[in-house]
Amino acid sequence: MLIHHIIAIDGPAASGKSSVARALAQRLGFSYVNSGAMYRAVTWHVLLRGVSVYEPAAVAAAIEQSRIVCDLIDNQSRILIDDHDPTPHLRDDDVNRVVSLVSSVSRVREILVAHMRECANKDDVVMEGRDIGSVVFPETPFKFYIDASPEVRVQRRRAEGQRDEIAARDRADSSRVASPLVVAPDAVVIDSSTIAIDGVDQIMERLAAKGLPVHSKTEMAPRQRMNPYYWLGYWLSRLLAQTFFRFRILHRERMIQSGPVILAMNHQSFFDPPLAGNAADRAIFFLARKTLLDHWFWGWLLPKLNVIPVDQEGNDRSALKALIRILRAGEATLVFPEGGRTLDGNLQPAQPGLGLVIAKTLAPVVPMRIFGAHEAWPRGSNRIRLHSITIVVGHPIFFTQADVAERGKEVYQRLSERVMNEIAKLTIDGKG
């Protein structure tokens, strides 16, 4: 008998189930559990120990001999193996290549399924994976299967800069003897190409129809409304960019459209802030050099566009404090982890300012990467060139108290670098 509410989200690799599951958990105030991250964690551990993934008995023995701790921290699942945190390595190419082999070992699945069920004994959960509704929690009435075409899923992986063999993963996951990927008979199938990261309304409606009190935990945070000046700039910038720069946004469905969120993007040009703002359906707040407001016109207009003046390309601590206040109020902000614009179009090292904001607010971060803005309007140039501009939106990064248990510049730097690494992985159709 289930003690807590359990929502099962299943689907194949790169189907969008993680985005949907995270958004749903946030809407409901449930804990989010990514079962796939658990299998990736033990895969990394097996590889680290030098165990052959082609020997199921050796893989099972290695996992049985390891100390695995799964917990829920700030509504997020966290796994430690022999006191090591594998999170930074979950998407390594080596892990991508063999995770299906490790997850097909029956004993490995038995061990991790037991940990998943322990999580459900602690809290209401939204759990995503490949057999959550069919094997792990077949008794839950709340089952969904998120799907997308193989072509769309391959494109998603490439845009993330990952080499994940979707067709091979599908064959392995569907044909394995232990808990194969199947659609549970009573699961609702949803095409993720028609659903945005916050577009979970149809799931919410079905949950309510099945008797789940969907508003019992948390309510949706109100979106920051666009004032007339912001609204005009929002649509005008989009129109001009699409007309002259063939501007497009890839994977806009990953954007978090409510509650506190940091949009973190590389910085190439003066075009970046207004174009980044087009990734959101609500008003966001921007940092800008204080000297821009010295001009009478910009000094009048920019504050109406939610611009926060900053000294020396983002080193003003008062501006960082303003960002923290804004995020704590449930709003969205744009931050450039690099601090200033690039001189040559290449990515620059991350600065610790973003990490400080993350540590103070634990706001989720949506990594974004802009391409072509440097060619269109490079730093130091007064000439604008007609060059295509594209923004790629990455998967949100969620942080817990464990990530900021320690404080200091080194920790802030590490947090910023973690975000910058995710930005670096984003590509256009697999091409950097």
Image: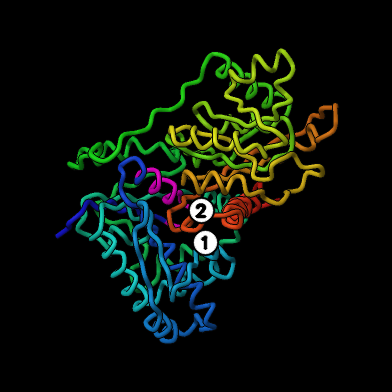
On whether residue 98 falls in the magenta region, the answer is: no
Nearest to N terminus: mark 2 or mark 1? 2
Q: Main secondary structure of the magenta part?
A: helix
Q: Residue 372 lies in what quarter of the image? A: top right
Residue, x 70% and y 27% (percent of image)?
Answer: 290
Tag 2 and tag 1, C-beta contact below 8 Å: yes
Residue 20 among those drawn in magenta: yes
Which residues, given as a range, are shown in magenta?
12-24
Q: Amino acid at mark 1?
A: Ala
Quadrant of residue 122 within the rendered picture: bottom left
- The residue singled out by tag 1 in the image is 167
Does 106 sit above or below residue 192? below
Residue 176 placement (x, y as % from top left)? 39, 71
Could you tell me which residue is drawn at 61 percent across and 45 percent down? 353
The residue nearer to you, when weighing 328 against 181, is 328
What is the C-alpha distance between the residues marked 2 and 1?
7 Å
Amino acid type indicated by mark 2: Pro
Q: Badge 2 local density, few (<14 within 10 Å), some, or many (20+)?
A: some
* Rendering coords of residue 335 (x, y %): 61, 39
Question: Does residue 199 appear in this view?
Answer: yes
Q: Residue at x 44, y 62 (%)?
A: 37
